[in-house]
């Protein structure tokens, strides 16, 4: 049973946020309150449903216990009690999941970086496959994507790419994709038919909003230069490419995809904010090492998380020992959701078990 006091605090906070929004809060306060309101609304709705289900069960049990209730009515009430208990158990479980401590960035959009690893041209082709997989998955979720930058290889693969994925709750799902993805297949360049193993790394960063990270202009060095293509040749006659260096941390980002210097600068700032926000989150997370143990995987981008074995047509996620023999539909992005949903469910189950163990 979920304590009534906990539900009351939750509902009271929701009403307080509504009142503050109605009073005309502006600027960053309005943004923060709106985000909190959006996060609390579904939880409060579930809490109200739980209250109602609990009240119905209590009323039914009172009817059964009442000596004045005739046998036919009692029999009907006992049958109803079984149905209500089953319903309440499901509602309670779903509400407990919603009440779990949330990552502050879960509701955010995300920036996905895909980089070819070991394996030369084959690794670059695999990185291109992964990029296409995420673009298709995002499309199926109704999210908007924008390719912020991409460096292509000679055979049509990619050396690295940065993809912005915009939507509600993007990071909550895509964050489990961070890590090393390994592929086993016969490369197009392999004449002998031998299976090669290559890899690509994926980093998923929550997109930072202005209220999440503040950057002082004096801490930035901005360089502009001519965009370059393959082989180093200049692809623009104007200096449209932009490199921004954050002096206190030494983090540097560069963008040259757009023909407009203004657009490249905007993309670079967005990427820099995401990297600084991620660095700050990692600093905080390292101080909460125990909490991170309950997550699926370590979140370390050097961790090998998944293998795509083409000869066997299988994909194995090593963190939850899940193997699916539908590689074509996963690498196309159509069935990637099956793996992501399993990872989310496992993460929730681990956190719920840890929370219940603490309360035991």
Image (tube, rainbow, N blue to C red):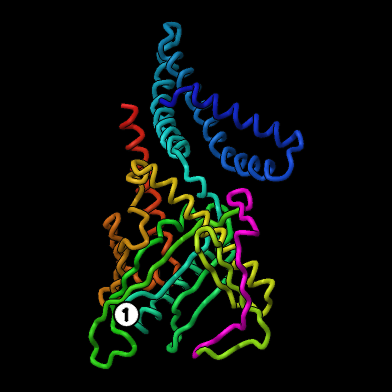
Q: Residues within 10 Å of mark 1 (few under 14, many from 20)?
A: some
User: At x 61% / y 78%, what residue is drawn?
Assistant: 241
Query: x, y percentage for residue 19?
Result: 70, 31
- Number of marks present in the image shown: 1
Residue occupied by mark 1: 119
As drawn, 338 above or below 344: below
Q: Is residue 234 left or right of residue 120?
A: right
Quarter of the figure that contains the N terminus:
top left
As drawn, 343 above or below 197: above
Q: Secondary structure at mark 1?
A: loop
Residue 21 sits inside the magenta stretch: no
User: At x 49% / y 65%, what residue is drawn?
Assistant: 112
Query: x, y percentage for residue 245?
Result: 56, 66
Query: x, y percentage for residue 204?
Result: 46, 61
Residue situated furthest bottom in the rendering: 191
Query: x, y percentage for residue 351?
Result: 36, 41
User: At x 55% / y 29%, what residue is drawn?
Assistant: 10
Residue situated furthest top in the rendering: 67
Observer-nearest residue: 245 or 30? 245
Observer-nearest residue: 149 or 187? 149
Q: What residue span does the magenta drawing correspond to? A: 210-231
User: At x 50% / y 80%, what residue is drawn?
Assistant: 151
Q: Is residue 33 left or right of residue 205?
A: right
Quarter of the figure that contains the C terminus:
top left
Observer-nearest residue: 171 or 75? 171
């Amino acid at each position: 049973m979920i304590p009534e006091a906990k539900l009351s605090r939750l509902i009271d906070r929701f009403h307080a946020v509504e009142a503050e929004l109605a009073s005309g809060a502006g600027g960053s306060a309005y943004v923060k309150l709106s985000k909190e309101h959006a996060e609390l609304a579904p939880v409060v709705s579930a809490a109200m449903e739980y209250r109602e289900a609990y009240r119905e069960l209590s009323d039914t049990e009172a009817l059964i216990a009442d000596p004045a209730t005739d046998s036919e009515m009692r029999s009907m009430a006992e049958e109803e009690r079984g149905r209500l208990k089953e319903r309440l158990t499901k509602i309670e479980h779903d509400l407990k999941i919603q009440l779990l401590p949330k990552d502050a960035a879960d509701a955010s959009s995300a920036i996905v970086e895909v980089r070819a690893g070991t394996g030369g041209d084959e690794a670059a082709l695999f990185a291109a496959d992964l990029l296409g997989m995420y673009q298709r998955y995002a499309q199926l979720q109704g999210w908007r994507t924008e390719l912020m930058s991409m460096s292509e290889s000679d055979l049509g693969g990619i050396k690295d790419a940065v993809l912005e994925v915009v939507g509600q709750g993007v990071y909550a799902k895509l964050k489990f994709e961070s890590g090393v993805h390994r592929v086993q297949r016969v490369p197009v360049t392999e004449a002998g038919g031998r299976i090669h193993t290559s890899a690509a790394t994926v980093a998923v960063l929550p997109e930072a909003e202005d209220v999440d990270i503040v950057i002082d202009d004096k801490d930035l060095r901005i360089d502009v230069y001519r965009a370059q293509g393959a082989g180093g040749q200049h692809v623009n006659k104007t200096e449209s490419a932009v490199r921004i260096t954050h002096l206190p941390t030494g983090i540097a980002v560069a963008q040259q995809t757009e023909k407009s210097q203004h657009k490249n600068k905007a993309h670079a700032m967005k990427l820099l904010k995401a990297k600084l926000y991620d660095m700050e989150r990692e600093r905080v997370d390292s101080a909460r090492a125990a909490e991170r143990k309950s997550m699926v995987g370590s979140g370390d981008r050097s961790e090998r998380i998944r293998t795509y074995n083409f000869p066997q047509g299988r994909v194995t996620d090593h963190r939850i020992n899940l193997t699916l023999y539908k590689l074509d539909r996963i690498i196309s992005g159509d069935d990637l959701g099956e793996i992501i949903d399993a990872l989310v469910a496992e993460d929730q189950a681990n956190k719920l078990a840890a929370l219940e163990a603490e309360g035991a």
